[in-house]
Amino acid sequence: MDENKTVRQLQEEVDAYIGQFKEGYFSPLAMTARLTEELGELAREINHYYGEKKKKTSETEKTVQEEIGDLLFVLICLANSLDIDLQTAHDQVMYKFNTRDKDRWTKKDVGDGHE
């Protein structure tokens, strides 16, 4: 397992996995529904670990990391099916945050011990 994969490598890996099946990618609408489902499962785990709602003894043990992984997989599938390069999408959003939103939040002072 390569711990230093790029976003493009993740997209290529998922594409190679999906490409071995005749069915291919689900439709964008179906994948959006899957994203919603996976986000709900992540929310449930967050609530169990950090909220007031604890797991029932009959519920299977899943982790926040596992649920984020499921969400990431479906997001990559959606991006791939729409020919969206996630690195480019990330760069676009970071540009937006570093320009339009650059003064939106209170920046830490250098040397304040909060790095």
Image (cartoon, rainbow, N blue to C red):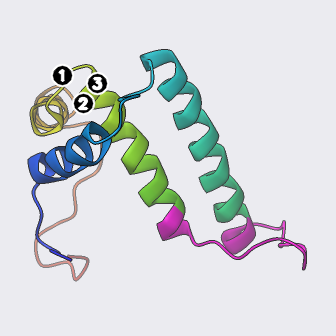
As measured in the structure, the alpha-carbon distance from the residue carrying label 3 to the one carrying label 1 is 6 Å
Image location (x, y in percent) of residue 84: 18, 25
**Residue 20 falls in which quadrant of the image?**
top left
Residue most extreme to the front: 22
Point out residue 43 in the picture as x, y percentages from the top left corner: 65, 52
Q: Give the range drawn in magenta.
A: 48-66
Would residue 87 be seen by someone viewing this image from the given angle? yes
Front-lying residue, 42 or 51 = 42
- Could you tell me if the residues under marks 2 and 3 are in contact, i.e. CB atoms within 8 Å? yes
The number of discs equals 3
Which residue in the structure is indicated by mark 3?
A: 81
State left or right for residue 5 relative to residue 20: left
Mark 1 falls on what kind of element?
loop
Contact (CB < 8 A) between labels 3 and 1? yes
Residue type of the residue flagged with mark 1 = Asp
* Residue at point 59%, 34% (across, down): 36
Q: Which residue is drawn at 53% across and 22% down?
A: 30
Label 2, label 3: how many angstroms apart (C-alpha)? 4 Å
Q: Position of residue 91 (x, y in %)?
A: 10, 36
- The residue that label 2 is drawn on is 80
Determine if the magenta segment contains residue 57: yes
Neighbour tally class for label 2: few under 14, some 14-19, many 20 plus, Cα within 10 Å: some
Tag 1 residue: 83
| 9 relative position to 105: left or right | left
- Marks 1/2 in contact by CB < 8 Å: the verdict is yes
Category of crowding for the residue at label 1, using alpha-carbon neighbours closer than 10 angstroms: few (below 14), some (14–19), many (at least 20)? few
Under mark 2, the amino acid is Asn
Question: Residue, x 55% and y 67% (percent of image)?
Answer: 64
**Foreground residue among 61 and 20:** 20
